[in-house]
């Protein structure tokens, strides 16, 4: 099977095997480590099977193909973050408080070494396999953007914000929160780690700038 192209007959979301869900999750965790170590192209189902102590047949039965396995890894990571994001957006508090908590969680999540590693794997592979970029964007950044857009639209309707274009506002807020540190983290692996005080100061300013434009 070619390692750098998505197979036409490979469903990106195969039906889970009825039994052995725990084993499926264990294999996905091993696969994530292998992808981070070798990159997408140089990782094969045989390598993952060997590292996981499973057969290739078991991997194909659970995931269908390498692309579907990678998609599930991205989706699992996104789901974990979005659960916390939804909890943050639903809890009581002013718009300033909600956005500050959201910004802090987002910046912290994006600057984790494993998050940056996943991003590098995707970026390196996109020229050969554009579908991986689409999977990554749709499962991660796009879903976060949709959640925030919905929140801003509701805040606008309540008169808490003056935000006639919540999608644009969401894009601007997310960019202000993580673009500088995220890009630096991607291209300078040995960068100085951002401290909590520095992170909070950055989020404070991003929220203040956002509310200066959109605050009611």
Image (cartoon, rainbow, N blue to C red):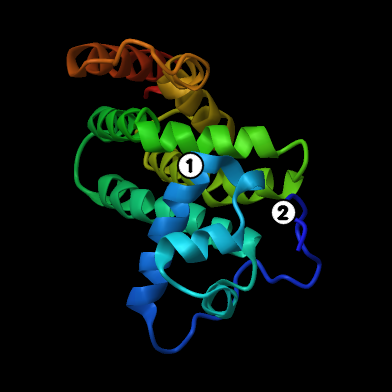
Q: Which label is found at residue 3? A: 2
Q: Which label is found at residue 36? A: 1
- Could you say which is closer to the camera, residue 100 or residue 211? 100
What x and y, as percent, mark residue 67? Answer: 64, 59
Among numbered discs 1 and 2, the one appearing first in the sequence: 2
* Residue 128 can be seen in this image: yes
Q: Is residue 115 left or right of residue 85?
A: right
What x and y, as percent, mark residue 166? Answer: 53, 36
Q: Quadrant of residue 64?
A: bottom right
Q: Is 109 situated above or below 54?
A: above
Q: Quadrant of residue 105?
A: top left
Residue drawn at 58 percent across, 79 percent down: 57
Circle 2: element type: loop
Query: Does the residue at mark 1 contact the one at mark 2 (Cβ under 8 Å)?
Result: no
- Could you say which is closer to the camera, residue 94 or residue 142? 142
What x and y, as percent, mark residue 26? Answer: 36, 66
Residue drawn at 46 percent across, 34 percent down: 117
Q: Given the current orientation, which residue lies at the most extreme bottom position?
A: 18
Q: Quadrant of the C terminus?
A: top left
Q: Residues within 10 Å of mark 1 (few under 14, many from 20)?
A: some
- CA–CA distance between discs 1 and 2? 15 Å
């Amino acid at each position: 099977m070619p390692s750098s192209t998505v197979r036409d007959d490979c469903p990106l979301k195969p039906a889970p095997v009825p039994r052995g869900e725990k084993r499926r999750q264990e294999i996905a965790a091993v696969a994530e480590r292998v992808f981070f170590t070798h990159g997408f192209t140089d990782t094969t189902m045989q390598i993952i099977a060997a590292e996981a102590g499973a057969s290739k047949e078991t991997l194909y039965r659970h995931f269908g193909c390498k692309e579907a396995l990678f998609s599930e890894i991205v989706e699992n990571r996104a789901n974990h973050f979005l659960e916390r994001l939804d909890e943050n957006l639903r809890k009581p508090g002013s718009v300033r408080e909600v956005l500050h908590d959201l910004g802090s969680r987002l910046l912290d999540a994006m600057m984790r070494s494993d998050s940056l590693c996943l991003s590098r794997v995707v970026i390196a592979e996109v020229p050969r396999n554009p579908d991986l970029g689409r999977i990554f964007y749709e499962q991660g950044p796009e879903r976060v953007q949709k959640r925030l857009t919905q929140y801003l639209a509701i805040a606008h309707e309540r008169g808490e914000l003056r935000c006639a274009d919540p999608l644009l506002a969401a894009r601007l807020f997310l960019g202000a929160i993580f673009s500088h540190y995220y890009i630096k983290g991607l291209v300078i692996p040995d960068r100085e780690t951002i401290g909590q005080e520095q992170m909070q100061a950055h989020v404070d300013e991003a929220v203040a700038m956002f509310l200066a434009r959109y605050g009611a």
